[in-house]
Image (cartoon, rainbow, N blue to C red):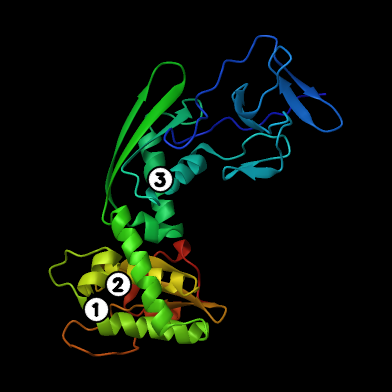
Amino acid sequence: MRRPKLSKLIVSSLLATSLLALSPIAANAEWKEDSTGWWFTEGNSSYATGWRLIDRNWYYFYSDGYMAHDTSIDGYYLNSSGAWTDSASAVIGREILKNVSVQNPTFYMQCSSSDVNINNLGNVIKGQIEQLKLSNPYEMYNVSDYQLNMSTNGSGIINIKVACNYKMSAEMAADLDAKVKSIIASIAPNTMSDSEKELAIHNWIVNNTQYDQSYSIYDPYNTLIKHTGVCEGYALLAQKMFTVAGIKSTVVEGTSDGQAHAWNLVYINSKWRHVDCTWDDPVSSVDVLRYDYYNLTDQQISADHSWNTSNYPSTN
């Protein structure tokens, strides 16, 4: 019988895993199978356990030596043949999100030069970051800037160092989480319907925030603490509050009046709707609460908002 084979690549955080500390495979090592499953001998009486790189594919072996398959280990899916099925870019994206989510200032990855050309690797990473901003805006918009350092030692392995600066530190993010949970418990308890919670969150943000005309506050923490922020701060704070309240939402990046702008899409009553807390909080007025941009359809908000509709859920 043929041994399992499939995917080629793994990108792993050196700070979080010991995948790279592997012993070399003996020359007479081989795959074996019985009625329970596949295992990999080490060329003596021992067998492989944990993660192993075998013939350019990554496999995971349980403590009894049998190969894992049709399951996820450490967040990575192993198919029926036991090998990782993720593309190089997908694995890179997952590692970036894992580290950015905990505000890791510096992290390391590796990939094979046969999977990603080092001359194009910067574009691959940039593309993954842009995709992650769509799927995980709260985490990814917290990155203010990043630097890449890439090198290869001639063995086919590309070493990647990523250094990130964040708008919110881990301590700020934790404090924001605690404060938002306290606010939501007060204004949008679980006794409310999702529609009532959504309205309460919209009203709280508009009533407690003013637009930052110095254009310096972009993060949700300072928007909450200082009661002022630009549209990005409004939208990220709204998403955080919606999430804590158990309401699905995302941040839309687009334009309004020809300028860059951000607002929210909220999944309410089984439909997506646009909510723009910034534009419901006019700069020229204090303590004005309006609903001109509350739960609008794509057609309604497109009168003065533009965005790449292919990147976001439709309100139809």
The C terminus lies in quadrant = bottom right
Q: In the figure, residue 294 lies in which quadrant?
A: bottom left
- Which residue position is annotated with label 2? 234
Q: Which label sits in the foreground, 3 or 2?
A: 3
Residue 116 percent location from the top left of the image? 46, 31
Q: Does the CB distance between marks 1 and 3 fall below 8 Å?
A: no
The Cα atoms of the two marked residues, 3 and 2, are separated by: 24 Å
Q: Residues within 10 Å of mark 2 (few under 14, many from 20)?
A: many
- Which residue position is annotated with label 1? 209
The image's mark for residue 99 is: 3
Q: Which of the two labelled residues, at mark 1 and mark 3, occupies the earlier sequence position?
A: 3
Q: Residues within 10 Å of mark 3 (few under 14, many from 20)?
A: many
- Horizontally, residue 131 falls left or right of residue 193, namely left
Q: Which of the two labelled residues, at mark 3 and mark 2, occupies the earlier sequence position?
A: 3
The Cα atoms of the two marked residues, 1 and 3, are separated by: 31 Å
Q: In the rendered image of this protein, does residue 72 appear above or below residue 196?
A: above
Q: Secondary structure at mark 2?
A: helix
Q: Which of the two labelled residues, at mark 2 and mark 1, occupies the earlier sequence position?
A: 1
The image's mark for residue 91 is: none
- Horizontally, residue 218 falls left or right of residue 53, namely left
Q: Amino acid at mark 2?
A: Tyr
Residue 288 percent location from the top left of the image? 24, 90
- Horizontally, residue 311 falls left or right of residue 1, namely left
Q: In the figure, residue 292 lies in which quadrant?
A: bottom left
Along the line of sight, the residue nearer the viewer: 307 or 204: 204
Q: Residue at x 50, y 30 (%)?
A: 18
- Horizontally, residue 237 falls left or right of residue 57, namely left
Q: Which label sits in the foreground, 2 or 1?
A: 1
Q: Does the CB distance between marks 2 and 1 fall below 8 Å?
A: yes
The N terminus lies in quadrant = top right
